Image (spheres, rainbow, N blue to C red):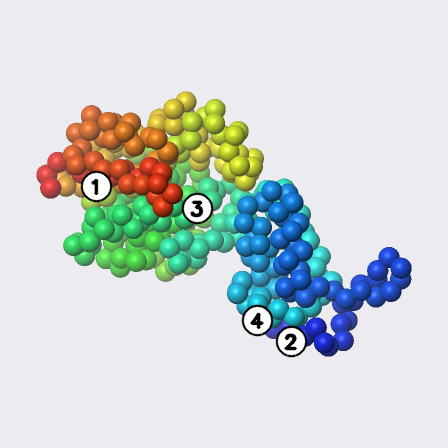
């Protein structure tokens, strides 16, 4: 049931007792956000104000920007207790997306859960680039390695109604999460999700227009140095790309040779400084016209190449 909005001038039934026994008014929305942002900043949480807003919006059951339409509404003790619990967890650098239980990717809603890789907005560039490559085609079939929460496959089929594909992950938890997201998006009839360790589980005789992946590409020894949200709380299996971060790319290149039709595209996310190595891996496997694309920060982020026969 929607709570009636209360202004700062109205009697406050959630006033709290101060140390001297007098009543102290509960904070307003804007006051709570300000104090929360200062608290998170003091614990070195990045984007503290944005985090504080998202967490309060979660508690209040509203959109983040609605907080400013309700800026002088005071929080109840129940609201404050829930907000404090969220803030304490976030101050431990527990990922915001896990607390919220969802994230937005390419303007689409995706459920998130602990144990499944948190989608990054940089990966939106991979979806964007794929759509540019296939711009003149009305339909396409694809296979994705490492579906995670399903943001890549889910975005591709949501934005392109004639596209169909298969997506798999080694993690049963990730595959189940992706399935739920595809059902929520209304695209579960166009993406088949399954659990598998390798492309060996993909049936012989199938042919695709696109092989896409955001594989683990972090060198093993550098994982502990990543921000706590990643190094402490995310699934290491979704991060660890072996000693040099490149261990999955030869497998992906080999799978594409078997599964892509003539002129088919392999499109991959990569780590900083890995562009030349991944291009070399693809060239050695017989791909043509490989290109590296940088992200908005000027860092190498994507590689795409074509099977011969364009």
- Could you tell me how far apart the alpha carbons at marks 1 and 3 are, in whole angstroms? 23 Å
Give the Cα distance between marks 3 and 2. Answer: 35 Å
Q: Earlier in the sequence, mark 4 or mark 2?
A: 2
**Secondary structure of the residue carrying numbered label 1:** strand
Marks 1 and 2 sit apart, C-alpha to C-alpha, by 54 Å
Q: Tell me the quadrant of the picture where the C terminus can be found.
A: top left
- Reading the image, the residue beneath label 4 is 69
Q: Nearer the viewer, residue 250 or 293?
A: 293
Q: Is residue 1 visible?
A: no
Closer to the N terminus: mark 3 or mark 2?
2
Of discs 4 and 1, which sits in the foreground?
4
Which is nearer the N-term, disc 1 or disc 3? 3
Q: Which residue is mark 1?
A: 265
Q: Work out whether residue 142 or residue 8 is closer to the camera in this orientation and state it.
A: 8
Q: Disc 4 or disc 2, which is closer to the eye?
A: 4
Q: Earlier in the sequence, mark 1 or mark 2?
A: 2
Q: Is residue 54 above or below residue 71?
A: above
Residue identifier under label 2: 4
């Amino acid at each position: 049931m929607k709570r009636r909005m209360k202004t700062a001038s109205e009697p406050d039934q959630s006033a709290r007792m101060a140390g001297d026994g007098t009543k102290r008014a509960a904070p307003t929305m804007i006051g709570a956000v300000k104090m929360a942002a200062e608290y998170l900043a003091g614990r070195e949480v990045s984007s503290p104000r944005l985090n504080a807003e998202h967490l309060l919006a979660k508690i209040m059951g509203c959109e983040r920007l609605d907080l400013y339409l309700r800026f002088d509404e005071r929080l109840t003790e129940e609201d404050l207790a829930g907000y404090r619990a969220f803030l304490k967890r976030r101050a431990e650098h527990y990922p915001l997306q896990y607390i919220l239980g969802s994230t937005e990717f390419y303007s689409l809603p995706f459920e998130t859960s602990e144990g499944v890789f948190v989608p990054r907005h940089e990966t939106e560039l991979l979806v964007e680039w794929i759509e540019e490559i296939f711009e003149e085609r009305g339909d396409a079939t694809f296979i994705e390695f490492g579906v995670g929460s399903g943001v890549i496959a889910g975005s591709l089929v949501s934005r392109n109604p004639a596209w169909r594909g298969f997506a798999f992950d080694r993690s049963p938890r990730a595959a189940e999460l992706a399935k739920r997201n595809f059902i929520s998006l209304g695209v579960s009839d166009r993406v088949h999700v399954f659990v598998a360790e390798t492309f060996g589980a993909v049936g012989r005789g199938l042919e695709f227009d696109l092989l896409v992946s955001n594989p683990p590409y972090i060198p093993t020894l550098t994982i502990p140095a990543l921000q706590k949200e990643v190094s402490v709380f995310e699934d290491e299996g979704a991060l660890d790309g072996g000693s040099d971060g490149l261990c999955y790319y030869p497998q992906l290149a080999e799978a594409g040779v078997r599964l892509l039709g003539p002129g088919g595209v392999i499109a991959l996310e990569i780590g900083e400084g890995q562009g030349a190595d991944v291009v070399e891996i693809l060239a050695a496997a017989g791909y043509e016209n490989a290109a590296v694309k940088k992200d908005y920060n000027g860092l190498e982020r994507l590689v795409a190449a074509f099977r011969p026969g364009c």
